[in-house]
Image (tube, rainbow, N blue to C red):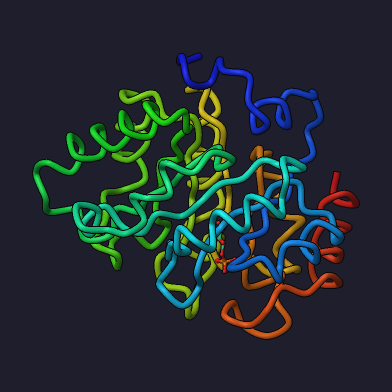
Amino acid sequence: MNHIQSLESPANALLHHGSHSPKLLVSVRDVSEIEDAIAGGADWIDFKEPHDGPLGAVSSNQACQMVRVVDSRLPVSAALGELIDWQSAPSQQLLKIPGIDVVKLGLAGCASLRNWESTWQDLYQQAADHGKQMAAVAYADWSRAEAPSPDAVLEAAIKTGASYLLIDTWDKRSRSTLDCFNPEELAGLVKHVRSSEIRTVLAGNLRLADISSAVELETDILAVRGAACRGDRTDTINYQAVRAIKRAIVSAR
Ligand SMILES: O=C[C@H](O)COP(=O)(O)O
């Protein structure tokens, strides 16, 4: 276990209860969506602007308000965008906001960059300096995203000591993560992550009908945005949609 994982944090406390049922993370874009997500059964709140790509960041003003509304009831993570944009990204401000426990940054466009690993490690250090845990992001459609392969991201996550590995889709228009892998391949990846003492977060266009297959993979967290909305992922979070997903998780145990 790395030093960041060993810290007592709301995120760690949530996952230390010995249950095999994955926790439900719901991505919200502003304060107006938080109560619906929590009332529907979210175990974890994620800050993300769905209009700005798969890992679009909310503004720091929004994030401060959102942290106040969550008010330590649940662990909080925040999307910070993509590593290739990091040097000039306004989302750097989110690292300074107390109440955000975990941050995640995508690696789209990094496959051909020689130094992505060292830049990513610098970011990891910055996050750790601000008391945040880091989620490495493996894109299920990595070739389309021109991102490093999930195996390469996992290797970097192990070396760096990342606390979580999020498996997500870069292209939100079509395939789910479950469509991007063959089932054995995905199960093998999840097993490898788990054996590396990194927590797994499974996301990527997961629909209600995907939940029972997703639960079988025994990840720590299932993460959704689109399936928790009234319409598509840019629409608003809907309490009933969140509740249906939560029920599907519980009944799939
Ligand atoms: O962190 C996970 C994402 O918010 C999942 O978004 P999605 O369900 O729209 O693919």
Horizontal and vertical percent position of residue 68: 67, 51
Left or right of 39? Residue 68 is: left
Look at 46% across and 40% down and name the residue there: 135
Left or right of 21? Residue 182 is: left
Residue situated furthest bottom in the rendering:
231
Look at 61% across and 61% down and name the residue there: 27
Look at 47% across and 33% down and name the residue there: 132
Look at 31% across and 23% down and name the residue there: 159
Q: Could you say which is closer to the camera, residue 89 or residue 4?
A: 89
Residue 237's image quarter?
bottom right
Q: How many marks?
A: 0
Horizontal and vertical percent position of residue 57: 43, 62
Position of 155 relative to 212 (above/below): above
Horizontal and vertical percent position of residue 170: 40, 65
Residue 152's image quarter?
top left
Residue situated furthest left in the rendering:
114
- Quadrant of ligand 1 in image: bottom right
Position of 116 relative to 128 (above/below): below
